[in-house]
Structures are given as C-alpha cells and as structure tokens.
Amino acid sequence: MSSIQILIVMAVYMVVVIGIGLFFARRANENSDNYFLGGRSLGPWIAAMSAEASDMSGWLLMGLPGVAYFYGFSDAIWTAIGLLAGTYINWLIVAKRLHAYSIIANDAITIPEFFSNRFHEKKKIIMTIAALFIMVFFTIYASSCFVTVGKLFSTLFDLPYHYMMIAGAVFVIVYTFLGGFLAESTSDFMQALVMIVVLVAVLITGVLSAGGVGAVYDNLQQIPGFLEFFGIASPTIGADGLQQVSQAGSPLFGEAGAYGFLTILSTLSWGLGYFGMPQVLLRFMAIRSNVEIKKSRRIATVWCAISLFAAVFIGIIGRAIYPAEHLTSADSEKIFITMAMGHLPTVLAGLAMAGILAATISSSDSYLLIASSAVSKNIYHGVLKKNATDKQVMNMSRLVLLAISLIGILIALDESSVIFKVVSFAWAGFGATFGPLMIFSLFWKRTTKEGAIAGMLAGGGMVFVWKLLIRPLGGIFGIYELLPAFVLSCIAIVTVSLLSKEPEALLLSEFKQAKAYRD
C-alpha cells in the first residue's frame, strides 16, 4: 500500500479542515463570545457530534483498542460501558440545567466564569482555582493528542517520532488560532462522522479477514482471561520489557488475573468524568435552544455506543489476526493503524488515518482553546486586568495557547507514553475537580462558595495524591483515582456548605429561575 496515496487522502482532508477554519475565522474574531462559545448558536447535530468527537480524542482509535489488544476484553469493555452510561446521564440531567443557568449567571461563556457567577464571588477565588486546574489538566490532555499524532505519522511514513509529533502539533495550533470555538465545533461534526465510519469499516474488514466471529472466539479463548468479563489477561513480560513469544511465534500469557467487583466499579467510574469535562459542558452552554437537547442526547448516545464498542472489538480482533505484532502496552496502541493498513483499500485506509488525525484535532483544539480562554478570560481579564479590551483578551488567549502547546510538546517528547494512561489521569482530574461541583451547583441550592472551593481543592488534590502515593500500594488501593477523588469532593462540598452561611436570597432566586427556565 502506497504511503504517498494515503498522504494525499490525508492532505485533502486537512485542506478541508483548514477551509472550515478560514470560513469561520472572520465571525470568530468579531468578539470573544463568538471566539470562545460560538455565540450560543450550535444546532443539535453539531452540539452532539462535536461534544463526543472532542471528548473521545485519539485514545478512542488508539488507546482503547490498545487496551483490548494487550489485556483482553474486561478492562476495555467495562470502560466503554461506564463512558456510555456517563454520556447519556450527562446529557439527560446536566445539559438543560447548565444551558439555562449559564445564561442566568450573567451569560457566562466559560466554566470558571459560570462557577464564579453562580456564587456571586467578588474576589474571584473560584474562578482562579478553576482556571488553573483547567490549564494543568488540559496541558496533559493536549500532550496525549500530540503523542497520538507522533505515533501515527512515524508509523505511516517511517520517520522519527519527535519530528512527526512536532509537525502535528504545529498544524493543530495554527488551526485553533484561525477559527475558535465555532470552527472547532463545525469541523468536529465532520470529524465525528469520519471517526465512526472508519471504526465500523475497520471492524467489519477485520472480522472478515479473521474468518468470522466464531474463528476469532476459537483463536482467543485459549488465552487465559482474554475474553472474560470478570478476568483479565496477564501478558508475560521479559527483562527487555517486551511480551515474551514462544518458538512457534505465539505470545505468552500467565494465569488470568482477577477482575472483581471493586475493579469493575473503579472502571465504570470513568463515566463520572463526564460531569466535569469542560469540552462537553461548553457544548451544553453553546446549544441554541433547550428544546433541542433531547435530540442531541439521542444522537450523542448512539454515536458513543457504536464508536466505543467498535473500538473495543477492533483491539480484540486485532489480537487474533496479529497475535505477536505489538509486544508492549505502548506499541499495542498502533493496532488500529495495523488493521487499517492491512485490510482496507488505499482510499479507505487514508480515510482511517485521517480519522485518527480527526480525533486528535477535534480534541486538542478544544483543549487548547478552553485552557487558553480559562487563563485569558478568567485570570487575565477577570482578576489581573479587569479593564482589558476584547481584543486584548483574545491576544492574551493566543499567547497562552502557544505557551500551553509548548509545554504539551515537551511532555509528549517521551515516545514510550501510553495514550490511555495519560488520558485517564487528565480525565480523573477534570471529573473529580469539576464533576461534583457542577452537579451540586445545578441541583442543590444550599451549595455555598466555601463548599465550592473545598470541593475543587479536595477533588483535584486527591487525584494527584491517590495516583502518585496511594494507588501504587496495590490491593484495594489499586482503584482508578477518579472514584475516591470524586467521592471526597462530594463530601467536602456538602460538609463545608452546611458549616458555612446559607446562600443569600438573590442566589436562591437565580437557582429557581434556572430550574424553571424555558427558551
């Protein structure tokens, strides 16, 4: 298969994406509201598809199939189930109330601004803390996207990873500069279509190449724990860090590991992350009408169901077809590329590679835009220079975007990074920092400013503490850091809110308005 032909298909796709950016650039640069939130003009299809595309990122096509390929069914499928449930519940209970409340809360256009306005704070403590957490976790997120691009291009064209990663990062930065939120959301709609098409295409051709579902099952049932819901495969790793292979060329596995109730609960907790994901929550704020949210919910749920389960089974089928092709956890994330290159016609393979690029672009431009807006709009304009003009805010946003991108590139220089693990940490960070606060802010009128601060600090801080200090202890402490951090944040919000002074009458009045809002 010709790499030149694949490159041409990808180049055509990139030209289309840039064209979208240029088309919306003039409108985006009219004012910061258009640049950061698209003037609250998103229709139901674009709102739903762009939310999911920006959320899933390159890990959907590389990270999730890689987990299924290396460790088997359980870890990947429970993660997918948790994410699907989280998607549906988030659209069901959060979307309508946040859309309304963000308008009532002085027309907030960023998540930190919403929290700040919701509690009528004067010293902007909530806004500053929220903006800083967004900057930290989205820098980590952006680095995972740059890793994805680096792995993709270095595999396709047999060129050094570092050069390819930097080239991809530059493209994303230029694109985000051009069009802002509206261009990002519109192109994300197209990219969501590309992602789901290539996932289904690779899945179908993979099943056919493997000889059918029955042949895949017969092949993989010999691997202990690989196809189990309540067990997990244990690859035999040698001193060189590679999975060991027998003389006959078969990968070696040890006894199946246990996958008990606590582990399942921990994995399902991925779904909790949705309540704190700024890139998804902003789509709730940007949709043009509350009445269209129901349609968006259906679209988003169907898209997620097809895409997530296709990604899981691509990894499973990939192990049957290429049993010893990828011998490390990091390298296993290339199984989607291997499957697409090996079984799709050239044009479709090029589209599949563009799908990875689509997923990466749709996420990284969201991450960079939200992080830069959090700093420029909420810290620079909200705290440091309150008389800054709209143009100064947008210029600062672009400077911050460059700074965050450079840090993300530095983090992504580690070629052995596992995309899934990088994403899981940032996902936990957002889920625990903002998820509980978002739910309590929208649905518990007794929530106070002090409770909000305590919840963010407790949740965001515990993600680091659990990940770095407690989780390495193993055993019952080996659960995903999002679950304990989310619970601790909830406890902090409730406890501190009850111990602090009740909200003033104006806050309670706005809470009632949001509850009854119609548009």
Image (cartoon, grey):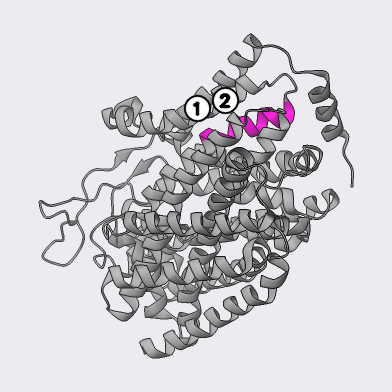
The one of 237 and 350 positioned closer to us in this rendering:
350
Labelled pair 1, 2 in contact (Cβ < 8 Å): yes
SS class, disc 1: helix
> Which residue carries the number 2 mark?
453
Q: Nearer the viewer, residue 453 or 62?
A: 453
Q: Is residue 433 magenta?
A: yes
Q: Count up the numbered dots.
A: 2
Point out the image quarter for the N terminus: bottom left
Q: Residue at x 65, y 59 (%)?
A: 391
Q: Nearer the viewer, residue 330 or 144?
A: 144
Give the side of residue 455 with respect to residue 349, left or right.
right
Q: Residue furthest top?
A: 499
What's the magenta region? 432-443
Q: Quadrant for residue 500, please give it.
A: top right
Disc assigned to residue 457? 1
Rendered image: mark on residue 190: none
Does the magenta run of residues contain 425? no
Instruction: Estimate the spatial distance between the alpha carbons at disc 1 and disc 2, rounded to whole Å.
Output: 6 Å
**Is 198 rendered above or below residue 360?**
below
Image spot of residue 115 (x, y percent): 66, 34
Crowd class of label 2 (few under 14; some 14 to 19; many from 20; radius 10 Å): many
| Secondary structure mostly taken by the magenta-highlighted segment of the chain | helix
Judge left or right: residue 300 versus residue 433: right
x and y percentages locating residue 513 in the rendered image: 86, 32
In percent of width and height, residue 42 lies at 75, 60
Residue 309 visible in the picture = no
The correct choice, above or below, for 22 with respect to 503 in the image is below
Label 2 sits on a secondary structure element that is helix
Q: What x and y, as percent, mark residue 436?
A: 60, 30
